[in-house]
Amino acid sequence: MDKWIKSPWFTRIVSLFLALLLYSTVTLDDNTSQTEEPFLFPNGSTETETMENVPLQVDLEEERYVVRGVPETVEVTVEGPVSVVTQAVRQRNFDIFINLNGLEPGTHEVDVQHEGMSSQLSVFIQPQTVEVTIEERSSVTLPVEIEFVGRNGTELSEVFASPPTIGPSEVEITGPKSEIDRIGIVKAIVDFNDITEDGNSRNIPVKVYDPQGNELNVFISPSTVNVEADVSISDKRLPISTETTGELSEDLVLEDINVTPATATMYGPEDTLNGIDQIDPIVIDLSEIRETTTIEHELDVPSGIRKVEPETISVDVEVAEAEERELTDLEIQVDNLMEGKDITFIDPEEREIDVTFIGKEEDLEELSEEDIRVWIDVSETIEGEVYKSIEIDAPDGIRWRTDTEQVRVRIQ
């Protein structure tokens, strides 16, 4: 026995066996840590977690195609060992995507796939499939037009010494060929109120519209432009207002008064312009108006001002045939009756009168008793019988008449 143990072959065989045993042990440990259920000590504990708003990526040859109908996010539910689920939810080191490579233009229903998930997890994606439309990608370079808003009819020549410039003047538009073929106009919309004192307006968004004025969903590069305008510091633009005097005949009502243009520009020394805040209102004598008419009015040039543009403006006075509506039994209120005094109505005996209101049909239709105030003022009367004039407050644009212009009252 001793002789056999001391044999070199015995030593070699034992060493080989130990080496194989060590290798098997290491391999078994590695496999056990990677299998879905541990080989020696299965824990049996699983968990389910749902992740919302997981970005859905698109695998597509973007240089040739664009895709529509892809939801921005999906819902992903994972089930498996607690530690693996927790790691997946916290780190989110996986991708959820649809693979559109190899598909021709058209509408397709494709599976939502995942990549980077642990093999120990069961993965459920909602929706499982999506319907998408693949279209050929197209690009075009077009000029950008400027549209000014908020100028109330003012001509650009009245504001700028020279036509405003836009930079860059052209943009590249990319999108589905069907959308690119529908392009009608490319423009940057500038609000007068956004123009700075030096005439510049920065980072104005560029919009693309079809011929019917519908905005198109396309990519624009660059997406904003700058507008530069030559604004003189020696001019001042002011609104033109109107005032009325006199009254229309009873068979007419005033519809509207429009001034064209709505503003005028004064040119002169800066210090003089700083002292002018308004243009004198244009006075319209309504007693001379018999029908809808246009009045040409020459603007006055204030002292120290070199010129006013335009020199003449148009005032459109629109009138319409008057409508009437009678409100009956309106209560007469009493103002400023001295404390401790009583008032009695003698003629009429009731504190009510009938009033006919005159105005536009739509205004009269909306008129109610809450909009009207009928009253007398007795502030200067101590006691006795007196006559007091009826006062009536009505909304602007509505006239009135009544057969009862005065009332007789007794104060005691």
Image: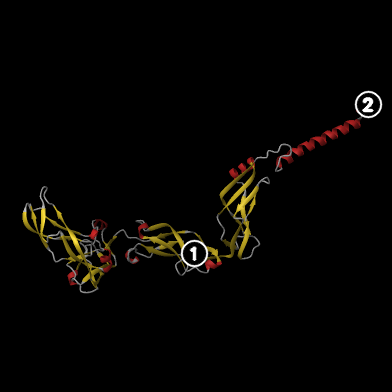
What residue occupies the far top of the structure in this picture?
2
Image quarter in which the N terminus is found: top right
Quarter occupied by residue 314: bottom left
Q: Are marks 1 and 2 in contact (CB under 8 Å)?
A: no
Toward the viewer: 105 or 325?
Answer: 325
Residue 161: x percent and y percent?
34, 64
- Please say whether residue 350 is visible from this viewpoint: yes
Q: Is residue 198 left or right of residue 71?
A: left
**Badge number at residue 1:** 2
Residue 107: x percent and y percent?
60, 65
Toward the viewer: 178 or 49?
Answer: 49
- What residue did someone put label 1 on? 216
Q: Which amino acid is tagged 1?
A: Leu
Quarter occupied by residue 167: bottom left
Toward the viewer: 407 or 151?
Answer: 407
- Please say whether residue 310 is visible from this viewpoint: no
Secondary element at tag 1: loop
